[in-house]
Amino acid sequence: MAKARAPRKIPAQQEAAAAVKAEAVAATALEKGELITSETQVQTGQFKEEEPGVWEGYVEWEKYPEKKKVGHELMKATKFPPPPEFQLAPLPKRNPVLYGDLYKDFHHAIGLDTVPEYSWGRVLKEKASTMTHVLAFPYNGEPNHEFLMKDPITPNEDHFVRNHGGIPKCVRPDKYKLQIGGKVNKEISISLADLRDPQKFPQQKLAVTLQCCGTRRIEQIALYPGHGLLVPNAPWPEGAIGNAVYTGVLLKDVLERACDGINVDKVKAHAEFISADTYFKFNQVYNYAVSVPYRFVDKDSVMLAWEMNGKPLPEIHGYPLRIVVPGVIGARSAKWVTRINILDEPSWGPVQRMEYLYYCNTQYGKHNTLFSNGFSIERMPVSSAIMKPNDGNIIIHDGQIKLEGWAYSGGENWVERVECSVDGGFTWYPVPEENLSKKHYYTWRLWKASIPLDMEGWCEVLVRAWDSSCNTQPISVRSVWNWDLHVTQSCHKIKVYSVNRTKPLTAQRLKEYEEAGLDFASEPITRPVPWPLESMEDYKARYNKYPREPQD
Amino acid sequence: MAKARAPRKIPAQQEAAAAVKAEAVAATALEKGELITSETQVQTGQFKEEEPGVWEGYVEWEKYPEKKKVGHELMKATKFPPPPEFQLAPLPKRNPVLYGDLYKDFHHAIGLDTVPEYSWGRVLKEKASTMTHVLAFPYNGEPNHEFLMKDPITPNEDHFVRNHGGIPKCVRPDKYKLQIGGKVNKEISISLADLRDPQKFPQQKLAVTLQCCGTRRIEQIALYPGHGLLVPNAPWPEGAIGNAVYTGVLLKDVLERACDGINVDKVKAHAEFISADTYFKFNQVYNYAVSVPYRFVDKDSVMLAWEMNGKPLPEIHGYPLRIVVPGVIGARSAKWVTRINILDEPSWGPVQRMEYLYYCNTQYGKHNTLFSNGFSIERMPVSSAIMKPNDGNIIIHDGQIKLEGWAYSGGENWVERVECSVDGGFTWYPVPEENLSKKHYYTWRLWKASIPLDMEGWCEVLVRAWDSSCNTQPISVRSVWNWDLHVTQSCHKIKVYSVNRTKPLTAQRLKEYEEAGLDFASEPITRPVPWPLESMEDYKARYNKYPREPQD
């Protein structure tokens, strides 16, 4: 893939000046320990992998501030080009769409040379060859839309992936230990075997839909480009969502039975999840770290999962152990989890505090955004998408257009109703209940519809869902636009070219094409008709009957 | 330019099948003489230039059906690739945008080999180097928008050009003769000298705005691609409009004084203009031919012009003589005019009858369009455009945004009012009269405005005009969309990124950029801020003051 890399230019002055400033800010913050997550135990760390022989590609940063400083120095010493400016230009027509060169460079800068290549290897091994690789590294990919519609349960090889770093490999799962600490009555270090022992913790199987809050971001990019994250925003289409049955135990059970519970106000408490993958922000190095309110742990079946659809968790999805937080932005369902901390506030990991913030949809842009202008994206709102047909398709029909897609709502909501419009959002037709997949508390619903369509030419087809709390979706993308281009929950709109065979002239024109050996549907709709639209005789006759100009 | 040509593929089956069908239709029509304009005198024509020594690159087709047949045979014998499919893909970022290979191939097929190169040479000689060449052949180009706004009178070298064929060269204007025939009391053949003799005809100077009805077509292409003409629709931005002072005589005066008037009902009569350039349609060859209702000749100062802004008419604009029809689609103002016929119906030239038809905006597409579904585009409706700033610009301002543009209405209307909106069309601010250029019966008005703008981020800036008959413009492109993508008279909308310096946080962020040696305005708006948006101290302080989650 290196060959295929897009050429990159570094505006030296920009890069240098920015580096100076970023460095200053970050250094100060580092001294204050502000950018370090709650674990503050300090050791003189060597720059080695944690638990060699157990993990490969896992460097523990959070335990060793000294090691973080070395990583920071190495990052500062490297000049990185700015991310490619794809948002103001059309996306490259290729797969992978984006290569993620910048994040590869980050890993090389601190000596994690093999991680990008290893991660890509896992993609090729674990994912269907039909995936759309939206960003090659860190890997972001979504499935072929037809496959996604086949079954409410998404096969592992078709399930979307949104990784934030490389894939660490656990080579000795038998030696793997999960640390649980922070404000618990008893800190523990627990093995997979103990976690999986049904005598110790009741096992759970739960169908959970996970969604990246970047789903359908491509619509926001098209209308109002935003600044995105440090790595280019993944220009997601409609497939950054999937549904799987996870096997594991409830975090709540583990905390209560193995840690004797937590010793902090349950209302204010957060559960922090720290992973084995390495994350970068403003020249600092971290382990991926996020948190969720303890309320969710208490009420929403937050799981420690080791199986996905009855199979061992794939490496790309977090083997040997991942967090699954139902109803919440996928970023909180940490993979390759190594440590859980109970805190009295949200994690200070940058993914928690500097990313996945929902900023005002105007007024707060690059020039005056503050982290505190945004609120953390946690539970996902009601949303939906049309997966079939696709934008720009020519639809030859007999007065009814067939549509398929998904609908989902997060938190404790489920989808109650799905409606479609073929006239740009003026008239809405409900999808009959029998055309919706079964209700579950934490899953999407797939739907199929056949909607009356008379008009011909370009029509605008929309879908909207209503959830169990009567939430629904706004019609325009603008109404949900936000500076970081998250949560595109406006009605999904596609344009299709309607050809209604029930209209006599249409039937006749289709016949003409057939007689001429042309396939109307496979012709670009913009190709001129290759013969006069009407015989001169008919044209003259009609002209004489209805002259263009008044006769008196 | 040949080198730079885009690769072209011929779907053989498609091309062949289409050719068979088109040929059959055309041949039948030809036998009936249906596709021939009013001049029916038949000679055994050789395939030579008309009046050698007077013209170069001018072949007379309309007088010689035999010659047309030979041309038709030559066209049939050649396989042409279909026009490039640019409408469904992003336009190439180059100048010329489109090369017009297909029309070049047409000319080569009938032996007019030198015409394309000669025409391009005239472009380079007569037009400013800053032109945007929308289509290199036949030449379609528009000026740099800033130049267009400098003066209500457009300099010749900046005036847009929409040619339908190559440029014929009149080498002996002293031998040039204009034929006038058809339903006149006396057919004449008149020299330039006689036309320009003030004793014979009163001379006129008239400021006239000419507009291609394809102006702003690019907006229709972006939303709802259409089938376009035989050559790719020129993807015009906002500059296919210009205003010049023409010197000449009124056609009405010439008809009355030299031809003793016309001998047909003035209400039904049309004046047909036939030009020296060659036009192609469905494998037939023609001279460019259009017509206008005699009413316009009678009432609307239709001119025979030999001067443009006090200079001899440039070759690219019709030297030695062109028609100027005020208030009407530019296509009727025929260039290099060789013959005028008075008819009792519109010309049957394909440009008149098969092009520039305004089809229904839906329901009539490729599959069921008939020529008789459309009506001829004659007088132009009220329209306007923002020429400064441009779509996507970053505007750093102090609460007022400056806008510039044009507004125009055809027929006997003029622009009375121009209004701007910076909130997507909700609130409208009138442009003060003193910021509008002077009113004339047949010209546009240039305008400048300064509109209050508080919001920051992407805002939608629109303009609309009101004419002397109280016509105004619809807001959405969809409401004016039509199958051939003509007359984009909906409100012109651009998106600009507003940075309001009067907001304290904005001023502070701009200062940060300045201190870091960065130029905010020249940075792509999508580039991430290269340092944390806020110090961790401030972030924590604000977080503690306004926690994300309720505390009880």
Image (cartoon, coloured by chain):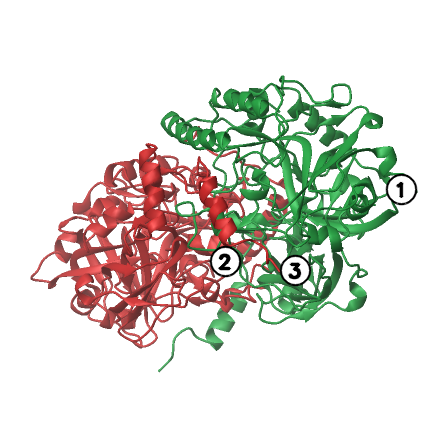
Chain colours: A green, B red
Mark 1 highlights which residue? A200
Q: Mark 3 and mark 2, same subunit?
A: yes
| Element assignment for label 2 | helix
The answer to which of B55 and B187 lies nearer the viewer is B55
Kindly give the residue lying farthest to the bottom in the view shown: A552
Label ID, residue A328: none
| Element assignment for label 1 | loop
* First of labels 1, 2 by sequence position: 1
Give the CA distance from mark 3 to mark 2: 17 Å
Q: Disc 3 residue type?
A: Val
Q: Position of residue B397 (x, y in %)?
A: 29, 51
Crowding around mark 3 (Cα neighbors within 10 Å: few <14, some 14 to 19, many 20+) is many
Snapshot quadrant of residue A254 = top right
Nearer to us of marks 3 and 2 is: 3
Q: Position of residue B409 (x, y in %)?
A: 29, 66
Label ID, residue A478: 2
Q: Residue at x 58, y 20 (%)?
A: A108
Nearer to us of marks 1 and 2 is: 1
* Chain containing mark 2: A
In this view of the protein, can residue A402 be seen by the observer? yes
Mark 3 highlights which residue? A382
